[in-house]
Amino acid sequence: MPDMNLTTRYLGLTLRNPLVASPSPANAELGHLKALEDAGIGAVVLPSLFEEQLLAHRESIDAILAQGEANNPEAQNYHPPLALDGPYGVGPQSYLELIRTAKAALDIPVLASLNGSTPSGWTDYAAQIEQAGADALELNIYYVPIDIEQPGSAIEQRYLDVLADVRRTVKIPVVVKMPPYFSSIGNMAQRFVDAGANGLVIFNRYLQPDIDLLRMQLSSELQLSQPAEMRLSLLWTAVLAGRVKCSLAGSTGVETVDEVIKYLLAGADVVMTTAALLRHGPGYISTLLADLDAWFEARQVGSPDNLRGVMSHSRLRKPDVYERANYIHLIEHYASSHRR
């Protein structure tokens, strides 16, 4: 375990360090969560519960109760067990139990995650998540707008409506896992904060299909993120840091301590990883923390607060590195270096 004080504040919560395990199927296992805690993780986000699971659960109960009402009025209070588990074996009821079990077993913050795309009745499940003891709720609003008649303003409002529904339901901190595809990312970030978001995850990594040429069909094989993919998230973490009044989580491409430090320099409060933990196992957190501790010690940084945001847009004397002027410089430099 690191010797230096890496204590971090995120969503009003105190974390022992800025490393957070973002949602993954492995986080549905209590043994895995305990291993992450033992390795030193600052907080964990449970795997997402999907809107489709919640709606199917509700429809099944309604159907059963409708059948029973004709036979026995007492059936209105009968809720039989339902096998409506998700892809990692966690359904609506067992998800609440996972939260309760994790909170009882762990001493670190436990965040829940809801994955949906429509502002509808499923969002009231957030209240049950809060009652189960989750320290915060991450909204993974996963929506691919394939309707070419739908304007961007309608898509933006859809996200805001989902957040508003959840915000009315719970008092615990709510985080929005933003996609990188809004026409004005900064403006949407501010609108999320104005609508009640306590934090933003930069960014949600959408799965993108490929074409299998051998079978001539679409393929949706899961590809874990690589460090080269972090640049877009790094850019917007740096642009938003110190300008929106909420917590920021840098996400995507975190494999080594280098990516952790870059996100902190850009202004992230915490740094999230899934891919590195799936590749190397929960014990890899110990390696990242030891490397982070060594980096801080060698440079006498003192704490994450002394490093955080040093390279953000709002604190650079010449912030044009994040703007158009740097683009022109890069093109000119590339051209001159490749002249024969």
Image (spheres, rainbow, N blue to C red):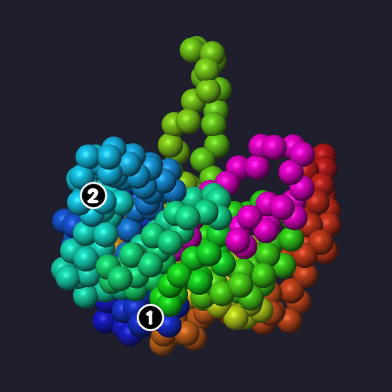
The residue that appears at 78% across and 43% down in the rendered structure is 338
275 displayed left or right of 207: left
Q: Which image quarter is the C terminus in?
A: top right
Query: Looking at the image, is 195 positioned above or below residue 31?
Result: below
Front disc: 1 or 2: 2
Instruction: Give me the C-alpha separation between circle 1 and circle 2.
Output: 46 Å
Q: What stretch is highlighted in magenta?
A: 138-161
Element assignment for label 2: helix
The residue that appears at 21% across and 59% down in the rendered structure is 97
Task: Give the residue pinned by disc 1.
Answer: 13
Residues 334 and 48: in front is: 48
- Residue 202 can be seen, yes or no: no
Three-letter code, disc 1:
Leu
Residues 106 and 60: in front is: 60
Q: Position of residue 309 (x, y in %)?
A: 57, 78
Three-letter code, disc 2:
Pro
**Picture disc at residue 73:** 2
Q: Position of residue 36 (x, y in %)?
A: 24, 62
**Picture disc at residue 264:** none
Residues 281 and 157: in front is: 157
User: For residue 245, what is the image quadrant?
Assistant: bottom right
Residue 141 forms part of the magenta stretch: yes
Q: Position of residue 284 (x, y in %)?
A: 28, 58
155 displayed left or right of 103: right
Residues 250 and 124: in front is: 124
Residue 169 forms part of the magenta stretch: no
- Residue 211 can be seen, yes or no: yes
The residue that appears at 60% across and 42% down in the rendered structure is 144
107 displayed left or right of 178: left
Q: Earlier in the sequence, mark 1 or mark 2?
A: 1
Callout 2: few (<14), some (14-19), or many (20+) C-alpha neighbours within 10 Å? few
User: For residue 194, what is the image quadrant?
Assistant: bottom right
